[in-house]
Amino acid sequence: MKIYIKTYGCQMNENDSLYMMGILEKEGHEIVGSIEVADVVIINTCAVRKKAEEKFYGKLGEALHLKKNKRDMLIGVGGCLAEKEREKLLEKGADFVFGTRSYPRISELVEKATSGEKFTYFEDHIDEIDSSTPRRLKGHHAWVTVIYGCDRFCSYCIVPYTRGREKSRPMEDVLNEVRNLALKGVREVTFLGQNVDAYGKDLGDGTSLAKLLRESLKIEGIDRLWFLTSYPSDVTDELIDVVASSDKISKNFHLPVQAGSNQILKRMRRRYTKEEYINLVNRIRNKVKDVSISTDIIVGFPGETERDFEETLDLLKTLKFERVNLALYSPREGTLAYKIYEDDVPREEKIRRFQRLLEVQKELNRELNERYRGKVVDVIVEARAKSGLMYGRDIRNKIIAFEGDESMMGKWAKVKVRKITAGPLYGKLVWLEGSKDDEDKTLWRSGAQAKSEEG
Ligand code: SAH
Ligand code: SF4
Ligand code: F3S
């Protein structure tokens, strides 16, 4: 059958979809790139904010419209919103609805739906994902989810309800998967978890993210390792040390702070204070040379006063994050904040605060990017951007765009920075792996020289 998969939400969902594609392809189905030609449409959904839900309903509407002229077409809904809405989605037109831990059985689910039955399926089969599971690859980079779920229950967040309790994959199996990926030409791997630094805790056998990174460094062919997302109070000194110890581990910590006021952090049920967070950032910066730190912030959380907001603004100015993902608070049914707090910051005020932070961050980004002026950065060429330029990212997760073509994808390149903006950098390619003037291939392949130099 021809199957179209549309994915919303975070990298974890993206990765789940790649596994679904691999599993379905192995069973003889064809994954198609357009909804019009599909026999089965699978929508992998996100529920983190209202807006994500609205996007899904737009897509569902489109699929239902097509179905009017194509009665046999099936619509399957998985992911976080499927966990939240369950049977209600059948009433809204879906043919089958499945949970965030049920997708390893996607092929059976499609088969069952073909027989005409409408159903929901929420059994936990997540253990069936292992190093032998077929998966789609997307270029030279792969995500590997190492810990499922989240036990943190931040008061605003729906994820613990949609993804369940924390469950780590055995380290040996993760390493086997990374080895397989390396054999298939993957050069960069990102270890994923909603709270990736909790990796291994539930296994009780001494497994940790630091240990996983250390072991992964030994795998030949893997040039760069990333990990995402760190919960601030779970970052250990051991992790910081291992990041500092190797040129192959990204010099980037994504450390969502969410707010700069202790009153708000407490209401959010984040388990750190502003002071502890600042301390952690300083600890990381002292140990990891040239590290970049990025964050997430929610504006307009219930009870956020102008003063609380100013504290967040000050934190941004003091810590100078390399990147900030901003979101307006969105009440999520079922969460603690939804139950006990009134969504009392007016929408216009949320937007004003959002815009103010954005403005300040843009200015900071421009200033921070100055450090790249005149430098030559080392990237692995990733893809073509909408602008038509090719791009890659450096070890600090900074994106640089330059003239080139698809044949460069997956190769190491040196790019001389020519133009600095508040967003990506722009530059000129000065060296490409495998080209005539690539004299020391082996050195590059080892990734050992992946350092910036003055140009
Ligand atoms: N596990 C990660 C983040 C997962 S959700 C962490 O602990 O930080 C990604 C981001 O969405 C969060 O960092 C938060 O900034 C935002 N978010 C989550 N729930 C939200 C809500 N109800 N309203 C607005 N933003 C929200
Ligand atoms: Fe949500 Fe908090 Fe878990 Fe992140 S740590 S997924 S914000 S509950
Ligand atoms: Fe969205 Fe679920 Fe990810 S709510 S952000 S898809 S964990």
Image (cartoon, helix red, strand yellow):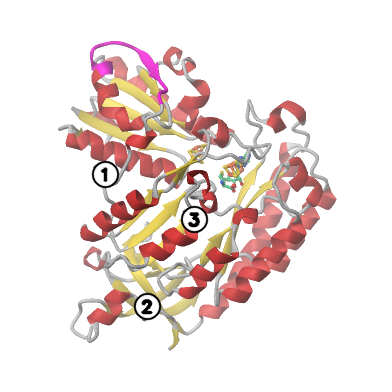
Whether tag 2 and tag 3 are in contact, CB under 8 A, the answer is no
Q: Which quarter holds ligand 2?
A: top right
- Identify residue type, mark 2: Val
Q: Residue at x 39, y 47 (%)?
A: 170
Quarter of the image where one finds residue 59: top left
Q: Is residue 109 left or right of residue 260?
A: left
- Tell me which label, 1 or 2, sits earlier in the chain: 1
> How many numbered marks, from 0 up?
3
**Bounds of the magenta segment:** 112-123
- Tell me which label, 2 or 3, sits earlier in the chain: 3
Task: Please give the residue where the numbered disc 3 appears in the rendered image.
Answer: 208
Cα distance in 3D space between marks 2 and 3: 35 Å
Label 3 near ligand 2 (CB < 8 Å): no
The local crowd at label 1, few if under 14, some if 14 to 19, many if 20 or more residues have their Cα within 10 Å, is many
Q: Which residue ends up furthest to the bottom in the rendered image?
A: 455
- The answer to whether residue 335 is magenta is no
x and y percentages locating residue 158 in the rendered image: 58, 34
Q: Which residue ends up furthest to the front in the rendered image?
A: 205
In the image, is residue 302 above or below residue 91?
below
Task: Please give the residue where the numbered disc 1 appears in the rendered image.
Answer: 135
Whether tag 3 and tag 1 are in contact, CB under 8 A, the answer is no
In the image, is residue 262 above or below residue 315?
above
Q: Residue at x 24, y 31 (%)?
A: 3
The local crowd at label 2, few if under 14, some if 14 to 19, many if 20 or more residues have their Cα within 10 Å, is many
Say which of 212 and 31 sits in front.
212
Q: Residue at x 34, y 62 (%)?
A: 188
Cα distance in 3D space between marks 3 and 1: 25 Å
- Identify residue type, mark 1: Arg
For mark 3, give the secondary structure.
loop
For mark 1, give the secondary structure.
loop
Task: Please give the residue where the numbered disc 2 appears in the rendered image.
Answer: 415
